[in-house]
């Protein structure tokens, strides 16, 4: 992955973003003392193109308040990721605490209010995995990606395959 | 027909395995980042954080 230009991001970002070498994450601290870590980890879920799994983790001692500056900083980091990487981004909601649907919806809402949303395709999906758990995921890709059609086709076909369940085939 | 069906299920299984592996990698990565964030928080404040949100 090509590293993001922090000086360029920080010219616009509401919060100052830094690189945390030890954990290989981008970090920032909000006005409410919430620390956010953002990771882009290469993955092989898509076969037709370079793809990364996107993660955001925040910690705090009080429940996180609604913070537009936090949303804008996260979206700016994603925007700069795509400026320097011709790749697809996969968002797989963490489902360890049962709040994955709420997080998936909030992420979709963030994206719907993003100033450059028309330059991107956000494709949210629900995937029932091998353990029968429902997972909320999304493909995020710039519309000017040269492999746009291949990537979207592969992702759509994969999701369509997952919707056909083995037990239905057996009947 | 049977060959086509067999191919379909093999492709589906391979794709599902890739998805499960991606989930596992994300889980492991989240655990690693969360630990690092919590340790830093404790060093700074003396306590572990009460709220951890993972997206």
Image (tube, coloured by chain):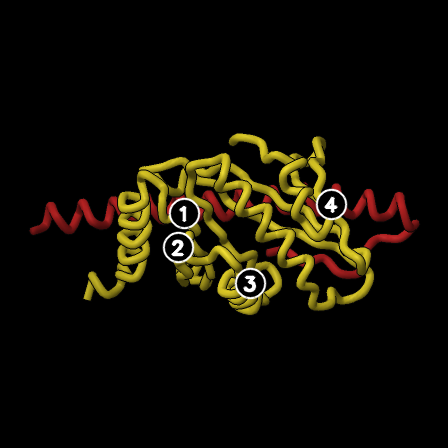
Secondary structure at badge 4 equals loop
Nearer the observer, B18 or A138:
A138
First reached walking from the N terminus: tag 3 or tag 1? 3
Nearer the observer, A170 or A165:
A165
Q: Are marks 4 and 2 on the same chain?
A: yes
Q: Are marks 1 and 2 on the same chain?
A: yes
Chain coloured yellow? A
Quadrant position of residue A3: top right
Chain coloured red? B
| Residue drawn at x 69%, y 59% as measured from the top left | A69
Q: Which residue is mark 4?
A: A16
- Seen as rendered, the residue at the extreme left is B1
First reached walking from the N terminus: tag 4 or tag 2? 4
Secondary structure at badge 1 equals strand
On the image, the x and y values in percent for residue A57 come to 66, 52
Q: Find out whether the residues at labels 1 and 2 contact each other: C-beta distance under 8 Å.
A: yes
| Residue drawn at x 63%, y 46% as measured from the top left | A38
Q: Which residue is mark 2?
A: A121
Q: Which residue is mark 3?
A: A110
First reached walking from the N terminus: tag 4 or tag 3? 4
Q: Which residue is mark 1?
A: A142
State how far apart marks 4 and 2 are (Cα): 27 Å
On the image, the x and y values in percent for residue A126 come to 41, 63
Label 4: how many residues lie within 10 Å, few (<14), some (14-19) or many (20+)?
some
Q: Chain of mark 2?
A: A
């Amino acid at each position: 992955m090509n590293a993001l230009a922090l000086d360029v991001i920080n010219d616009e970002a509401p919060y100052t973003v830094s690189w945390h070498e030890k954990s290989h994450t981008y970090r920032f601290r909000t006005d409410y003392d919430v620390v956010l870590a953002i990771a882009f980890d290469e993955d092989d879920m898509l076969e037709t193109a370079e793809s990364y799994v996107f993660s955001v983790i925040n910690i705090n001692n009080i429940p996180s308040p609604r913070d537009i500056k936090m949303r804008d900083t996260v979206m700016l980091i994603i925007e700069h990721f795509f400026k320097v990487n011709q790749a697809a981004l996969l968002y797989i909601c963490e489902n360890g605490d049962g709040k994955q649907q709420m997080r998936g919806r909030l992420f979709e809402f963030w994206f719907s209010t993003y100033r450059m949303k028309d330059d991107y395709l956000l494709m949210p999906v629900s995937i029932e995995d091998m353990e029968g758990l429902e997972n909320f995921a999304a493909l995020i890709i710039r519309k000017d990606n040269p492999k746009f059609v291949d990537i979207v086709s592969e992702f759509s076909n994969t999701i369509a395959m997952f919707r056909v369940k083995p037990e239905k085939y057996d009947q | 027909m049977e060959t086509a069906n067999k191919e379909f299920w093999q492709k589906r299984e391979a794709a599902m395995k890739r998805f499960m592996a991606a989930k596992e990698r994300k889980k492991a990565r989240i655990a690693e980042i969360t630990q690092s964030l919590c340790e830093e928080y404790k060093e700074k404040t003396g306590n572990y954080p009460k709220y951890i949100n993972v997206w």
